[in-house]
Every structure is written in C-alpha cells, then in structure tokens.
C-alpha cells in the first residue's frame, strides 16, 4: 500500500473575509495557517502534499507557500476550475460560485494515487488530528471503503465574531459515523450555542459537546471513483433547481455511501481546539493563539528551518 498523502483544499475565494485568507500571515514569522497543518502532518508521517488551488493565484500561492514546502515534502498541484465538468455539461450562465468541496476532490482526481487525508486550507486542526488520521490510513484494511474522520467538540469550533457552518455528526456505539447534518448558521449566545436553518425564523439549542466535522477526512482512492461517478447526477439536478449556487459537498458523498451501506467511516476524536479565520475579527485571536503555541515550543521558530 502506498504511503498516505495530505490533500489541502485551498481554492476558496474567502468572500466573507474579503481576500485570500488561506495565504494571510498569522504566524510569528509570517506563516499562513495551513503551514501549521502541513508541519503537523509531516511530523505525523505524511511526506506528500497535494494543493488544490485556482489557476488565477497559482503564482502567488507558489511564492508564498508551495515553493517553501517543496524543500521539505513532495508537492503536487490540482486546479479547481468552474469549467472542469464531465462531458456534456457546461457552466450555467451567470454562475460564479465554485462547485464545492466534493468538486475540489474531483479536480484532484489525476494526482491522488494513495490513501489521503483531506483538510481545509484556512483551518488549524492541531497535531493530534494528523497522528490519528495517519495511523488509520496506514493500517491494513479489508477493503478500501473503510474511511475515517476526525471530529471536534462543537464548543471548540465556534467564533464570537459571527455565525459558522458546521456538520453535526451522529455515531453508533462503535464510533462509526451514521450521518452528518449540515447546519449553515451556528452561533454563540448568552445561553450557549444555537443554530437556525430558516434564516433566523426559528432557533434550536445545540450541546457544546456535540461532535462536528471540520472537513478532516481520511479516505482511499475509492472515494475519488465515487465522487466522479456521482458528479453527473448532482449536476443534472443542480442545473435545474439551483444553477447559480448549488454546491457538491464532500459530506454529501459520504452520507450517500453510508445510506447505501457501501462504506464505513470511523469517527476519531480530538479535544484540541480548532482555530480558523471566518471573519476579519477572528484574525487577532488566531495570531495570538498560534503565537502562544509557537513560543511555548509546539512549533519551530520559524517553522521551516
């Protein structure tokens, strides 16, 4: 079996943030947030990283991140393009929005050739998560539809700067994933954490210890095949019902496979605190947290010596 590789989804536009937040400097020596994840992944055993980016900022990305990492790991690139669709499909007129996280995996179909962990570029996951997922992917499995994900406690993933989107996980007694329910608006209030799925008409309280997905998945190449196969059905529906905004989500594919009993997903866990930049107001908090971790000895100064 080939050694697991790290896949980073870094093609997002950062519409709420106003710029390419995945390249923004947050470390003591100007590191981007993904550099901490790459370092943690390398320490866990990953030796290859695949960056999924847009062609429009390829030069900037390589100058800031890619060329630096290439001195320490094998680096591969995939380019997420709105027009990269199966034969017979075209981008709906007026569509500007990317097709989503499962389409990002589709975009990398030609450069992922081993078990892989996939993460968001603009999230800090903590070192424990990468140790857990690498260990799982590196173990022998009876077939390649045995996946995993690393879950976080909801209370460790919110921000007081505004609402966030999170996938709430349901598991069985063996810590296998039953399903992920996406909530697009979760926020903290005085009494705790709540969510709304109807633009604030009604609200529901959520427990702080609920397990949530932060898009850290451990997958095998079989997932690439499934994503490619299901994209056509998604597009047929999306182009009729919501051509400008419908997105093909990675957890959607996972849920379909679970419902079909075709795959299993072991839910690994970490109590590490997640850090991310959804809003401009989040950045000072992330900078402070990473500074404390770095100066406390969790990371070299600078990371890539």
Image: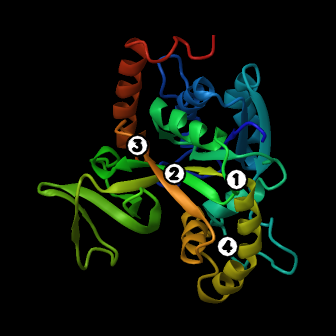
Q: Earlier in the sequence, mark 4 or mark 3?
A: 4
Q: Which residue is mark 4?
A: 95
Q: Is 102 or 18 nearer to us in this picture?
A: 102
Q: Which residue is mark 3?
A: 280
Q: Which residue is mark 2?
A: 149
Q: Report the quarter where the N terminus lies.
A: top right
Q: Residue lying farthest left?
A: 191
Q: Quadrant of residue 41?
A: top right
- Can you say whether 120 is above or below 128 in the image? below
How much space separates mark 2 and mark 3, taking CA atoms? 28 Å
How much space separates mark 4 and mark 3, taking CA atoms? 26 Å
Q: Position of residue 115 (x, y in %)?
A: 71, 46
Q: Nearer the viewer, mark 3 or mark 1?
A: 1
Q: Earlier in the sequence, mark 1 or mark 2?
A: 2
Q: Residues within 10 Å of mark 4 (few under 14, many from 20)?
A: few
Q: Look at the numbered disc 2 and give the secondary structure of its residue.
A: strand
Q: Which residue is mark 1?
A: 220
């Amino acid at each position: 079996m080939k050694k697991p590789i790290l896949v980073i989804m870094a093609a997002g536009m950062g519409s709420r943030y106003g710029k390419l937040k995945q390249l923004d400097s947050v470390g003591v020596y100007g590191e981007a947030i993904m550099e901490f994840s790459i370092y943690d992944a390398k320490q866990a055993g990953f030796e290859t990283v695949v960056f999924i980016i847009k062609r429009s900022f390829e030069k900037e990305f390589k100058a800031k991140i890619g060329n630096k990492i290439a001195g320490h790991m094998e680096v591969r690139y995939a380019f997420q393009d709105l027009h990269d669709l199966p034969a017979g499909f075209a981008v709906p007129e007026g569509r500007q929005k990317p097709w989503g996280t499962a389409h990002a995996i589709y975009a990398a179909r030609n450069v992922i050739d081993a078990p892989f962990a996939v993460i968001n570029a603009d999230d800090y996951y903590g070192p424990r998560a990468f140790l857990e997922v690498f260990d799982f992917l590196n173990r022998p499995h009876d077939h390649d539809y045995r996946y995993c994900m690393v879950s976080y406690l909801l209370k460790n993933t919110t921000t007081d700067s505004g609402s966030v989107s999170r996938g709430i996980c349901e598991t069985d007694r063996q810590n296998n994933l039953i399903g992920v329910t996406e909530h697009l608006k979760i926020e903290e209030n005085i009494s705790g954490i709540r969510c709304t799925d109807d633009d604030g008409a009604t609200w529901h309280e959520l427990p702080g210890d609920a397990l949530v997905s932060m898009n850290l998945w451990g997958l095998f190449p079989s997932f690439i095949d499934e994503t490619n196969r299901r994209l056509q059905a998604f597009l047929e529906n999306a182009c009729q019902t919501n051509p400008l905004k419908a997105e093909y989500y990675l957890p959607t594919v996972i849920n379909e496979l679970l419902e079909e009993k075709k795959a299993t997903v072991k839910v690994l866990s970490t109590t590490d605190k997640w850090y991310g930049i959804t809003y401009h107001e989040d950045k000072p908090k992330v900078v402070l947290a990473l500074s404390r971790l770095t100066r406390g000895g969790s990371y070299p100064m600078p990371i890539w010596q």
